[in-house]
Amino acid sequence: MSGSTADKRSAFHRLHEAGCFVIPNPWDVGSARMLSHLGFKALASTSAGFAWSVGYRDGEAPLEDMLGHLKALSAAVDIPVSADFGNGYATDLPALEINVTRAAATGLAGLSIEDASGDASAPLFEFAHALERVKTARTAIDRSGARVLLTARSEGFLLGKPDLAETIRRLCAFADAGADCLYAPGLKTTDGIAAVVKAVAPKPVNLLIGPTGLSVAEAAALGVRRISIGGALARAAWGEAERVAREIMESGTFTGLARAATSAAVEKTLK
C-alpha cells in the first residue's frame, strides 16, 4: 500500500485534534480493506475478533500471532491502524516495555493499554501499578522513536467495577502520565460520558458504542472525539454465518445465502 507509516501516524494524531470520528474494528486483512474501501479514516484492531478468527477465545491468542496480525493490518491499508493491545501481554513492567516496543515496530499508528489484570479475584490492577504501566508504555513508545498514539483504558465498567469516580481518577492519572487518548469501555450514560470528557479535557476520549447506544452526532455533542465498536462487527459476521449454516443443517434449505454479498462486490473492496 502507498501510505507511509509516518504519514499514517501523523494523520492519526490529526484526527484526534478536533471533531468526532468512528474507528471501526476489523478482525482480519479482508475486513480491514473493506472498511477502508467504505471511507473510514482509521481502523482499530479487535483482540476478540482476531482471536475468534484463528480459533481462540478472547485473550488467548498468543503474542506472536497478535504481533503478526497487527503488522499485516497496518500494511494492508493506507489509513492509520490502532491496536487493541489488551494488557500488553504482561503484568510486570519490563515485559510490558518490551511488548509495547515490539507492537510499535509493526507499523501501527496507535495502541491501547488497559488496567485489566486478568485475575478474576482482583480484575483491575491496583491504582499505582496501573499508573506505572501507562508510564512504561509511554516510555517504550518514546524510546522507540515511533510516533504511536497511546490510548489508556480503564476497564471497571466492563469488569463489574462500575465506579465512575474511580474510573475518572484513573483516566486523569493516565492522562497526566502521558496517554494521548482516554477510554472507559462500558460507559453508557450521557452524564457519565460527559463527566469523563470534562475531567480529562483537553485530551480526547474514545467511546465504545453498541446497537442500543448513542449516534455519532449524539456522542459528538457530548464531546467524544473517537468512537469504536469493539468485536461487534466480527460478532455480526459470525452470527450471520451461523444463522445460514444452521438453516442448512436443520432445514436442508439455503435461503439465507440470498443475503450474501456477491463475489464481485467482495472483490471490489479488495482492490
Image (cartoon, rainbow, N blue to C red):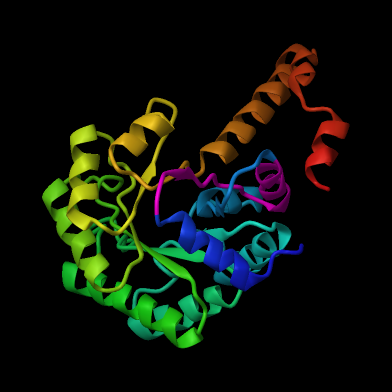
- Against 184, residue 216 (above or below) is above
131 or 56: nearer the viewer: 131
Residue 107 showing in the rendered view: no
Left/right of residue 221 with respect to residue 32 in the rendered view: left
Magenta range is: 18-37
Q: Position of residue 257 (x, y in %)?
A: 78, 20
156 or 139: nearer the viewer: 139
132 or 176: nearer the viewer: 176
- Against 209, residue 36 (above or below) is below
- Counting every numbered tag in the picture gives 0
Query: Which quadrant: the N terminus?
Result: bottom right
Kindly identify the residue that appears in the image at 57 percent across and 52 percent down.
42
Q: Position of residue 237 (x, y in %)?
A: 63, 34
Choose top left, top right, bottom left or bottom right for residue 17: bottom left
Left/right of residue 261 with respect to residue 84 in the rendered view: right
Q: Position of residue 217 (x, y in %)?
A: 39, 31
- Which residue of the protein is positioned furthest toward the right in this rendering? 264
Residue 123 showing in the rendered view: yes
- Which residue of the protein is positioned furthest toward the left in this rendering? 165
Left/right of residue 220 with respect to residue 126 in the rendered view: right
1 or 251: nearer the viewer: 1
- Against 258, residue 90 (above or below) is below
Q: Is residue 241 magenta?
A: no
Kindly identify the residue that appears in the image at 82 percent across and 32 percent down.
265
Left/right of residue 230 with respect to residue 75 in the rendered view: left
Q: Position of residue 45 (x, y in %)?
A: 55, 54
